[in-house]
Amino acid sequence: MASPAIVTLSSANFDAEVLKSSTPVLVDFWAEWCGPCKQIAPVLNEIAEEFTGRGKVAKLNIDEGANQQLAATYRVQSIPMFLVFKNGEVVAQHVGISGGKPKLKSLLEGAIA
């Protein structure tokens, strides 16, 4: 179950929630069938809670509707793929769940610093 602190993205709200966000955003590109995506979900919930007000965590299901186009735009070829956006630009990325919570936190921290 996703934390209320996690933003659910779609092609409709991507610009407002990510590209125009006043704080850095860690975006998780995932799919329902992806085992590692489900495995990392509790970690993302924790990070979302810890960064409330300083940064945000958002999830984009690449299998839903026009979200496939967003995945293509950001060259998502393997999931889970994490991109950190700051001021509308990708400033960091990581593929897979290696490194776990420390790795993902450091990506978001780097964009806040």
Image: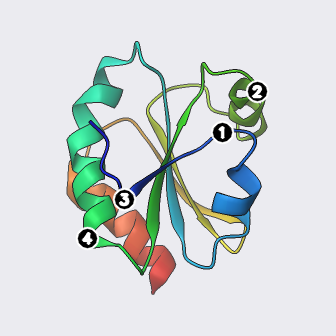
Query: Disc 4, disc 3: CB below 8 Å?
Result: no
Q: Residues within 10 Å of mark 4 (few under 14, many from 20)?
A: some
Q: CA distance from mark 2 to mark 3?
A: 24 Å
Q: Which label sits in the foreground, 2 or 3?
A: 3
Sooner in the amino-acid sequence: mark 4 or mark 1: 1
Identify the amino acid type marked 1.
Answer: Ser
Label located before the other in sequence (4 or 3):
3
Residue picked out by circle 3:
5
Q: Quadrant of residue 92?
A: bottom right
For disc 2, the marked residue is: 66
Q: Secondary structure at mark 1?
A: loop
Indicate the secondary structure of the residue bearing disc 3.
Answer: loop
Quick one: label 2 or label 4, which is nearer the N terminus?
4
Q: Earlier in the sequence, mark 1 or mark 2?
A: 1
Pointers 1 and 2 in contact (C-beta within 8 Å):
yes
Contact between labelled residues 3 and 1, with CB atoms less than 8 Å apart: no
Label 2 crowd bin: few (<14), some (14–19), many (20+), radius 10 Å: few
Measure the alpha-carbon separation of dots 1 and 2: 8 Å
